[in-house]
Image (cartoon, rainbow, N blue to C red):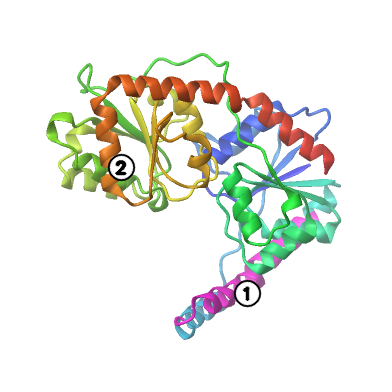
Amino acid sequence: MLLLDTGKEWGGGTNSMIELLKRLDHARFAVSACFYHDYPHGSSTLAAELAAIGVPLIVMPVRSQPLWAKIAKELLRGLLGWHRRWRAAAVFRIELCWRIRPRARALAAVLRRGEYTLLYMNNQPASNLEGYLAAMSAGVAVVQHCRVEPVVNAFERDQVNRAAAAVLCVSEGVRDALIRQGVRGELCQVIHNGIDVSQAMPDAQRLPGVAPGMPVVGVVASLLKRKAVDHLLRAVARLPAAMAPHVLVVGDGPEAADLRGLADALGLSSATTFAGFQARPLPWLMAMDILVLSSPSEGFPRVVLEAMLLGKPVVAARNAGTTALVEHAVTGYLYDFGDIDALSRQLAVLLNHADLRRAFGEAGRRRVIANFSIERYVAGVTAALEAA
């Protein structure tokens, strides 16, 4: 089996993939991994993490975008700026020509040389399109693991319907989104991500300068614009001074400097800890009283599973992944993405009521233990791989 992942950074989907690979029966599945980037994981790397569980890594070469493609896309964006759908279709055709089809040919050669019988793809159809084309060329079965809320165009939909033996969806919302966009419903199976519910609970990370009893509201995420971490800072800034919590931001990324600047502008710099990337996030989650996830789109966010297992209430923007996990007013609160006032109000309720935080946290922990074990996750994926 060849595992294809086209991602550029370590995220929750990578963690779930690694947990699966650790537990797959390697006597039944001889696995190699294929990525375009050997990206870092703290002081380690993807290659080192995979090698530790006996999975070799193939790093595919990345071709720079040719000048003709860049110029053509800019011209088309200008000429078709008045029609969004036509513009997107034209730009996609250029991407198909210079990037996706050449990658598919290179990947098909890897599939043939390695005599692989199954291509397992870890992302979503639009990100893994070259895999579908390569597998059809090489005569290899395909299983797609869709870990994010997907958007597919007509060409991508057709390749999925033609080539996939199964599309594993991390939530009902992901499945429904695929079906709405024309992916055949019989291909789509919901297999929720899982977590080791029997693992020892960590001690909370100490936060220097945070007074005992000071509530901590936090986020664990890649610091990317699409994660909307700034919404958390803005929501905290709208709270009355008497209930202001400490803010803990765990993660790194291109938005880090802007977020530090925003915290300073909002008067929160002394009340905010930017912890950077942490290879072991659980102690940092344990230090939080409330986890916030303010991103507009998630497939099935692992960090919410982790927080709930630790007995932490969650406040999250409503999307395909968070609605599958967070039971509103039972394990936490959901709000409409971008409604920062609503986020601030929900934080205020939880900050004012420690008993409610405990009740939500205990309900969340029970929900994770009952429904989202790592054993159930691995068994479901294994059955789908065998069926393919």
222 and 179: which is toward the camera = 179
Mark 1, residues whose alpha carbon is within 10 Å: few (<14), some, or many (≥20)?
Answer: some
* Left or right of 342, for residue 372: right
Q: Is residue 184 above or below residue 257?
A: below
Q: Residue at x 84, y 52 (%)?
A: 140
Q: Report if the CB atoms under discs 1 and 2 are less than 8 Å apart.
A: no
**Residue 343: assigned label:** 2
327 and 197: which is toward the camera = 327
Q: Where does label 1 land, which residue?
A: 93
* Left or right of 326, for residue 207: left
Residue 210 placement (x, y as % from top left): 22, 23
Residue 200 placement (x, y as % from top left): 51, 13
Q: Is residue 247 above or below residue 296?
A: above
Residue numbers of the magenta segment = 81-109
Q: Quadrant of the N terminus?
A: top right
The residue most toward the front is 329
Q: Secondary structure at mark 2?
A: helix
Q: Residue at x 73, y 57 (%)?
A: 184
* Left or right of 318, for residue 191: right
Tell me the kind of residue under disc 2.
Leu
* Left or right of 75, for residue 263: left
271 and 175: which is toward the camera = 175
For marks 1 and 2 on the same chain, the one whose residue lies earlier in the sequence: 1
